[in-house]
């Protein structure tokens, strides 16, 4: 079987499995999986920038929050319906990522990481500063009545699960499309050797900017969907913690692999969930597990799969 | 004509090239010879726009390209194979070639022509670049530069660390390119390779010209090389 067919079989198989799971999972895990799929969309957005383009960012919470607040504020203050609110969230993410990309991409390496972190912190403080609009640290709830799209209440578990699955499938399809396009290959070339890509005649800045905007918009889509599906918009999602999470998810799952961000998100989510049921020092268990994984699978879980079993894994 | 007109260039405040002048005509192979640190690689990087000029000009077909950003210099038709190959290691051979082809919108015909020149790569199309041997990596780096359909080709020590059969293959490619009217600027440490393929040899020392001579003169009198390089 060719790599392309195997790849399609793997990713379609995953979507089919997630579809089927919704009929058999108990309510608790049903909700968890919906949350994981949305967060995996965030991680896949991060992966475009970090895994495929080689831009290490510690400020992706800004994009997630831009989508979440773009959607949430439209609902809260403009009485927008869910669909226009989602579009507002996407636009907010695209605009913020374009503006940030134009500024931050003038730096490179550690400086880029720090500039991104600073802007993300500025975004977080902005959310707190405009507390009259954003309700600051406390955040605000989006009522069930405000979460009805085309007559379907998105707060219902089944509808929420399918909406999360649809978002996840879209992010997966965009990432798969990206890695098979010449544009995606140029991003990988930039990650591998930026100077060489430039010497071949590629406008590295323009390609990186496009990657930042695509990554930011995908992360914003996840942020907007999270707020809409789970009915809460809060400053926590703009904090540095939500910049570190996608980095961990992607590293654990496998940077530069399509399926890695989902595996990493799933693994980390349940690692914390299960260990917190055993002890209050659950972060210690999570930390030890992460150290072991880093030692024995430095390329991440999907990265190791690629190294050991399937070299053509996208 | 690729022309360097009294260029000064370097890294930051450290000036490496001093009033260096050089020309490469279409279909001509010019070799830069000089001791380590003479400024050979710096010359290549300056042509490609990777280092800023302090003074002087780089012209291509009479048009000044010194002020262009690096990616536009490459788009003007200069292919560069840097020292150490620098492949896109995670991409396959086919994908590395595709990256080169896409720069100028070249199609399958160009790819086929390149693979005819370097047939060994055809057997490796699906293989990741990082798994190739040193010689094959050099072939791929050269092939990728050829995919850009360059009018001028800059090769920085292309035979470094290669076995004789690979050196011969690279030399053949340079010969074919010359036959097609491509100007080649070559940095090479192996004097035998230089004498076999160069039309002219430019000696540089401490970033400035010492002497530019026809290769025939060097073949006739080995003392010239000994005098300039001490070998």
Image (cartoon, coloured by chain):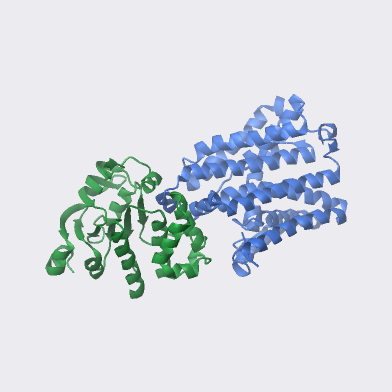
Q: In percent of the image, x 61 and y 41: which residue is there?
A: A216
Q: Is residue B73 visible?
A: yes
Residue A82 horizontal/vertical position (percent):
77, 33
Q: Quadrant of residue B116?
A: bottom left
Q: Is residue B185 left or right of residue A15?
A: left
Q: In percent of the image, x 53 and y 66: which residue is there?
A: B126
Of B25 and B99, which appears nearest the observer? B25
Q: Quadrant of residue B82?
A: bottom left
Residue projecting furthest to the bottom = B164
Of B126 and A60, which appears nearest the observer? B126
Which colour denotes chain A? blue
Which colour denotes chain B? green
Residue B154 horizontal/vertical position (percent):
32, 56
Q: Quadrant of the N terminus of chain A?
A: bottom right
Q: Is residue A16 left or right of residue A61?
A: right
Give the total of numbered labels.
0
Q: Is residue A88 left or right of residue B18?
A: right
Residue A145 horizontal/vertical position (percent):
85, 32
Of A17 and B153, which appears nearest the observer? B153
Residue A113 horizontal/vertical position (percent):
53, 45
Q: Is residue B159 visible?
A: no
Vertical arrangement, residue B56 with respect to residue B113, above or below:
above
Q: Quadrant of the C terminus of chain A?
A: bottom right
Vertical arrangement, residue B21 with respect to residue A95, above or below:
below
Of A111 and B93, which appears nearest the observer? B93
């Amino acid at each position: 079987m060719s790599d392309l067919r195997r790849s399609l079989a793997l990713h379609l198989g995953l979507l089919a499995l997630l579809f089927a799971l919704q009929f058999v999972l108990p309510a608790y895990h049903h909700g968890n999986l919906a949350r994981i799929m949305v967060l995996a969309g965030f991680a896949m957005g991060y992966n475009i920038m970090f895994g495929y383009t080689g831009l290490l960012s510690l400020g992706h919470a800004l994009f997630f929050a831009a989508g979440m607040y773009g959607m949430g504020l439209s609902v809260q203050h403009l009485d927008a319906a869910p669909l226009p609110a989602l579009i507002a969230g996407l636009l907010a993410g695209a605009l913020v990522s374009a503006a940030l990309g134009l500024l931050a991409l003038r730096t490179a390496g550690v400086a880029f990481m720090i500039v991104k972190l600073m802007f993300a912190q500025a975004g977080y403080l902005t959310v707190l500063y405009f507390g009259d609009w954003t309700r600051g640290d406390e955040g605000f709830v989006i009522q069930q009545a405000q979460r009805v799209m085309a007559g379907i209440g998105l707060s219902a578990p089944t509808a929420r699960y399918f909406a999360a699955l649809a978002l996840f499938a879209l992010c997966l399809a965009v990432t798969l499309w990206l890695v098979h396009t010449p544009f995606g290959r140029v991003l990988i070339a930039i990650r591998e050797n930026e100077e060489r890509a430039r010497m071949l005649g590629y406008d590295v800045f323009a390609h990186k900017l496009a990657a930042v905007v695509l990554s930011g918009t995908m992360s914003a889509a996840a942020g907007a969907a999270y707020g809409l599906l789970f009915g809460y918009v809060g400053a926590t999602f703009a904090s540095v913690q939500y910049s570190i999470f996608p980095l961990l998810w992607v590293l654990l799952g496998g940077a530069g692999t399509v399926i890695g961000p989902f595996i990493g998100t799933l693994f980390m989510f349940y690692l914390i969930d299960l260990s917190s049921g055993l002890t209050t020092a659950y972060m210690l268990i999570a930390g030890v597990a992460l150290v072991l994984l880093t030692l024995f699978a430095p390329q991440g879980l999907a990265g190791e799969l690629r190294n050991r079993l399937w070299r053509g894994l996208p | 004509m690729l022309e360097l007109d009294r260029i000064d260039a370097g890294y930051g405040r450290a000036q490496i090239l001093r009033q260096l002048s050089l020309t490469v005509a279409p279909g001509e192979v010019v070799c830069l010879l000089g001791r380590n640190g003479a400024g050979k690689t710096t010359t290549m990087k300056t042509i490609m726009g990777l280092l800023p000029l302090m003074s002087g000009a780089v012209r291509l077909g009479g048009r000044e390209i010194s002020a262009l950003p690096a990616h536009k210099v490459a788009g003007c038709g200069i292919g560069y194979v840097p020292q150490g190959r620098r492949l896109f290691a995670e991409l396959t051979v086919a994908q590395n070639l595709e990256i080169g082809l896409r720069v100028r919108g070249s199609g399958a015909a160009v790819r086929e022509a390149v693979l005819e020149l370097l047939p060994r790569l055809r057997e490796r199309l699906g293989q990741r670049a990082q798994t190739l041997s040193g010689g094959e990596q050099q072939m791929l780096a050269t092939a990728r530069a050829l995919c850009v359909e360059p009018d001028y080709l800059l090769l920085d020590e292309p035979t470094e660390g290669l076995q004789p059969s690979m050196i011969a293959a690279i030399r053949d490619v340079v010969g074919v390119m010359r036959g097609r009217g491509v100007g080649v600027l070559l940095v090479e440490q192996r004097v035998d390779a230089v004498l076999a393929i160069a039309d002219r040899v430019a000696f540089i020392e401490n970033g400035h010209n010492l002497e530019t001579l026809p290769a025939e003169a060097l073949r006739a009198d080995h003392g010239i090389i000994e005098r300039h390089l001490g070998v």
